[in-house]
Amino acid sequence: MTKVAALEATALAEEIGRWVLVESPSSDAAAVNRMADLAEDRLRAMGARIERQAGQGGCGDILIGRIAGQTEGPGILMLGHMDTVHPLGTLDGPLPLRREGDRLYGPGAYDMKGGNVLGFAALAHLLAQGRRPHLPVTVMMIPDEELGSPTSRDAIQAEAARAACALVLEPSGGGGALTVARHGMVRYHLRVDGLSAHAGAEHEKGVSAIREMAHQVLAIEALTDHARDFAVNIGLIQGGEFENSVPDRCEATIYARVPGPTEAEELRAALTALKPRHPKARLTLEPGLYRPPYEKTPEIQALFDLACACADDLGIPLNGERVAGGGSDGNFTAAVGLPTLDGLGVIGGGPHTHQEYALISSLEPRARLLTALLERIGTS
């Protein structure tokens, strides 16, 4: 039926390796689509009804597989993403696929090809035994999550409107904690326009956009308040063309973690109130991609409680719940009111680094937990 019908650690690790070997950086649509081809093959082997939406804006395709449940009606939206932050060639360079003790290293092994494999394996395991999820399952594989899902958000929310709940296959928190809430992630783009001049002959006639931006960076990052889990970061700046010219333009991307709508509005108000230090400099602020806060609700608590009951029955430690600092596509489903349980993927570490790994010992227990959830969600 598929490469993994038995929930066994070695088989699961080997299947994760097959996914990892298909490098799929977000910005390379062809590479992401090669990953989609493999995922589609696995879904077809399970008898899923396939829908594939052509990529937009330079991103890969959205892949959807629909699997009937024991009942009809609104079902489970199982969310994963196929893209990674790692560029092509990472496998042959700083992060080769390898096993070292209990660790399986490779680009996407943790974030989040490992989680995708666990979700697919749980479904394949049920079907191979002649069983089915209680509710219908829609598997949705996203091509651009690491970019903020700019071409996928509308499709995710459209599926969320038809679902009963969402299970997100992002990696777990430390030691296996499930994610019941996430902070919102807000981006803004700030541009400074100054006046160019020859830095040697007429330096006094110029207005440096980079210097002006430096003042603004200090003011913007001073908004950070870690006591409230409110963090404002400027990680990208571009400006200037020649070392002997006063730069007349500088651009920066502002990325902020906001625990709730109050902080999101506080940030917006502070940024729109910015004023240039130099009277001849000009600031232009534009909003960018936004992941709304994913806040825990009684329905999410009920999903978490069910996961705990399943884990107890299986003898699997969960290590509780967590509020995650980073965003996921679960932010979009939770924000439209869909009960969402996130962090159901592998246990491991090193996301977005050359030390990314999944713990092989976590694979079978996490796959069995997903299997149990698929059978029990909607039964009471």
Image (spheres, rainbow, N blue to C red):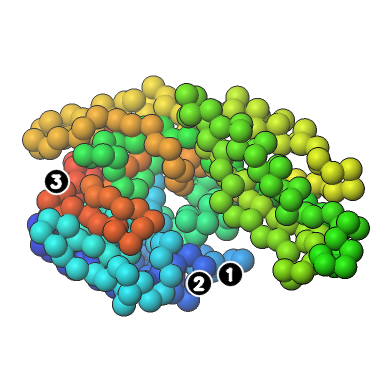
Residue 176, given in percent of the width and then of the height, sits at 23, 40
Q: Secondary structure at mark 1?
A: loop
Left or right: where does residue 160 sit relative to residue 34? right
| Viewer-closest of 171 and 135 | 171
Q: Mark 1 Cα within 10 Å, few/some/many (few <14, many 20+)?
A: few
- The structure residue drawn at horizontal position 48% and vertical position 65%, both measured from the top left corner, is 26
Q: Secondary structure at mark 2?
A: helix
Q: Are marks 2 and 1 in contact (CB under 8 Å)?
A: yes
Residue 9, given in percent of the width and then of the height, sits at 11, 57
* Image quarter hosting the C terminus: top left
Q: Mark 2 Cα within 10 Å, few/some/many (few <14, many 20+)?
A: many
Distance in Å between CA atoms under marks 2 and 1: 6 Å
The amino acid type of the residue labelled 2 equals: Ala
- The structure residue drawn at horizontal position 39% and vertical position 56%, both measured from the top left corner, is 352
Residue 32 seen by the camera: yes
* Image quarter hosting the N terminus: bottom left
Q: Which residue is mark 1?
A: 58
Residue 287 seen by the camera: no
Q: Mark 3 Cα within 10 Å, few/some/many (few <14, many 20+)?
A: many
The amino acid type of the residue labelled 3 equals: Pro
Q: Are marks 3 and 2 in contact (CB under 8 Å)?
A: no
Distance in Å between CA atoms under marks 3 and 1: 37 Å
User: On the image, which quarter does residue 141 sit in?
Assistant: bottom left
Q: Which mark is residue 29?
A: 2
Badge 3 or badge 1: first in the primary sequence: 1
Left or right: where does residue 61 sit relative to residue 264? left
| Viewer-closest of 218 and 14 | 218
The amino acid type of the residue labelled 1 equals: Gly
Q: Which mark is residue 365?
A: 3
Badge 2 or badge 1: first in the primary sequence: 2
